Image: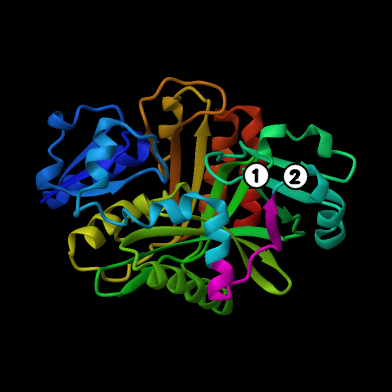
Amino acid sequence: MQVCVLGNGQLGRMLRQAGEPLGISVYPVGLDAEPGAVPFKQSVITAEIERWPETPLTRELAQHNAFVNRDVFPIIADRLTQKQLFDKLGLATAPWQPLSSAAQWPEIFARLGELAIVKRRTGGYDGRGQWRLGPADTAQLPADCYGECIVEQGINFSGEVSLVGARDRSGHTVFYPLTHNLHQDGILRASVAFPLVDIARQQQAESMLSAIMHELDYVGVMAMECFITPGGLLINELAPRVHNSGHWTQNGASISQFELHLRAILGLPLPPPVVKGVSVMVNLIGTAVNYDWLKLPLVNLHWYDKEVRPGRKVGHLNLNDTDTDRLSATLEALTPLLPADYHSAIQWARQKLQ
């Protein structure tokens, strides 16, 4: 079995690693690769990114019948059509509307309240291409945003969670437990996942993500990010791929999200993953590798072998144990081995474990 992954970043790398024990050859390919050098005609094709420029390779792949979810990516990659999908299915999300001109602002604040979240329809992630604006701040918005953005109501949420699940071609779905996430400056810093969850919240999330995957006839892993509010979960965004908040599954579940995605797109068995204890994932962002992390026996290092630059995801640490006290103690021991800007995220994770 053979899979080509459009995109050769860390997600493609981890898909390749997940395929090796199963005898699945996975080829992550850059967008500018020459079509003749890519074995896509004999492969099932997937992607680690939602949106890509037109290149000779992507033009070839766009015509390939084995490109799984080929027609779904444009819907989810555009926040306008993504929000329209939620509304069509009656799924809870923050009140929103398209942003067409500056003349809309008085009506927007009257309808949505004093805090507006502006997001570019396409592109923009990890906090980029987004603005938090009050009535006195609208002049800060670049002029080219009008007609290219949506605006949402700022939500007063108590926490952020994500649900990672998968669907096969027959419509069978499986899910991991909800993952608690902490974002700083728009970038995921840490995640905590428990094997025992709030049943009502888990059922609500699974119902919402199932409705989306069935409507789109989606095959593979999809992630759904949500806000926790007194009225229940509100969907923030979707990712039609393996997701940063699911990295803990590499060491905390019987089947990782990467293996689960390969199983789904190749028609292999898709049993529910068994979750082993409590997991913590710490994103490594613009941080040089420190092999002293490996002195701690619960720490699993996943290093992407990328040039270290400010704001760039260069790896992650996974910790897993059935004993939350031992896990918390390991996090405490890890704290001085990380830069100071990680300390609040480590403290957040330790509080989640209590």
x and y percentages locating residue 265 in the rendered image:
23, 59
Which amino acid does the dot numbered 1 rest on? Answer: Gly
x and y percentages locating residue 315 in the rendered image:
43, 34
Which amino acid does the dot numbered 2 rest on? Answer: Ser
Q: Earlier in the sequence, mark 2 or mark 1?
A: 2
Judge from the rendering whether residue 111 lies leftward or rightward of residue 94; answer left or right. Answer: right
Q: Over which residues does the magenta segment extend?
A: 86-99
Residue 185, can we see it?
no
Q: Is residue 203 above or below residue 254?
A: below
- The answer to the question of whether label 2 and label 1 lie on touching residues, with beta carbons closer than 8 A, is yes
Q: Which residue is mark 1?
A: 147
Q: Estimate the spatial distance between the alpha carbons at disc 2 and disc 1, rounded to whole Å.
A: 7 Å
Residue neighbourhood size for the residue with mark 2, other residues' Cα within 10 Å, grouped as few (<14), some (14–19), many (≥20)? few
Q: Which residue is mark 2?
A: 101
Instruction: Name the one closer to the observer, 134 or 296.
Output: 134
- Tell me what residue is drawn at x 42 percent, y 42 percent: 51
Q: Secondary structure at mark 2?
A: loop
